[in-house]
Image: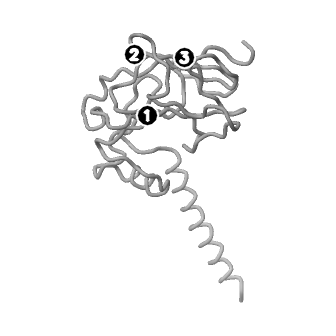
Amino acid sequence: MFRFPLFIAITLVVAFGGGIMVSLYALDATQGFGAIKLGAWEAFPELQTADADPYAKSHRARAGKLLYGTAEGLAFTASVDDNGDRLNAACTYRMSGQTPPARLWTLFTSDNSGNPAAVRAGLPAALNSWTVLRNADSSFTIEISSHAKPGNWLALPAAGTFRLVLTLFDTPTAGSSGVIDLAMPKLEKIGCGNA
C-alpha cells in the first residue's frame, strides 16, 4: 500500500534534487559568455548590462553582489599566470606594468568563489592606484607572496589556490569596444616554496 507513494516520493526527490544540483553546477562553471582574455586577465564586459546572456544574469542574481554600470567600472580576474599555470599561494608572483586608464583601480586576492581571501590580520590584503609606489614612467611592480617583500607587496592566504581581482573604476574602457586593445599588467611566477 505504501510502496507506490514511496516510489513517487523518491522519484520527485531525485528529480528536483538532481535538477537543482545541475543548475548550481552550471552557474558555478561559468560567469557567462562574451569573456575577453588579455594575457592572464579575463573580463566580462556585458556581465552587468541588459544584453547579458541568461547564464550571466543567473550568476549575477545568485551572487547578490553590487554590480557596476557599463561606464562605472570593469572587473578583471586572473586565476592563472601569464604561462597559464594556476595561481597558488605557495608561490611568489610579480605583477608589473601599467593598468588601462582609470580614475581608480583596486587589486585584491580572492578565493575561487570570488570572495576576498582570508589573509592574516595586519597584512596588506588589497592595493589601489592611490597607495601603490610607481616608477618614473608611471609603471609599477607588485610582489604577490605569503612572505613580506620590500616595496609594493600584496599578501596571500596561507595555502591553496586563489584569484587576483583588478577592478577599474570610472574608466573609458568599460563602455568601449576597444577593450581587446588594452595593455594589462604582466603576471609572472617568480618561484615556489623557498626558491
N-terminal of the pair, mark 1 or mark 2, is 1
Which one is closest to the eye, mark 3 or mark 2? 2
Rate crowding at label 3 as few (under 14), some (14 to 19) or many (20 or more) other CA atoms within 10 Å: many
Q: CA distance from mark 1 to mark 2?
A: 20 Å
Question: Element at badge 3?
Answer: strand
Rate crowding at label 1 as few (under 14), some (14 to 19) or many (20 or more) other CA atoms within 10 Å: many
What kind of residue is marked 1? Answer: Phe
**Residue in the picture at 46% in, 34% down:** 106
CB atoms of marks 3 and 2 within 8 Å = no
What kind of residue is marked 3? Answer: Glu
Q: Which mark is residue 188?
A: 3
Position of residue 149 relative to residue 124, above or below, is above
Question: Element at badge 1?
Answer: strand
**Residue in the picture at 25% in, 34% down:** 176
CB atoms of marks 3 and 1 within 8 Å = no
N-terminal of the pair, mark 3 or mark 1, is 1
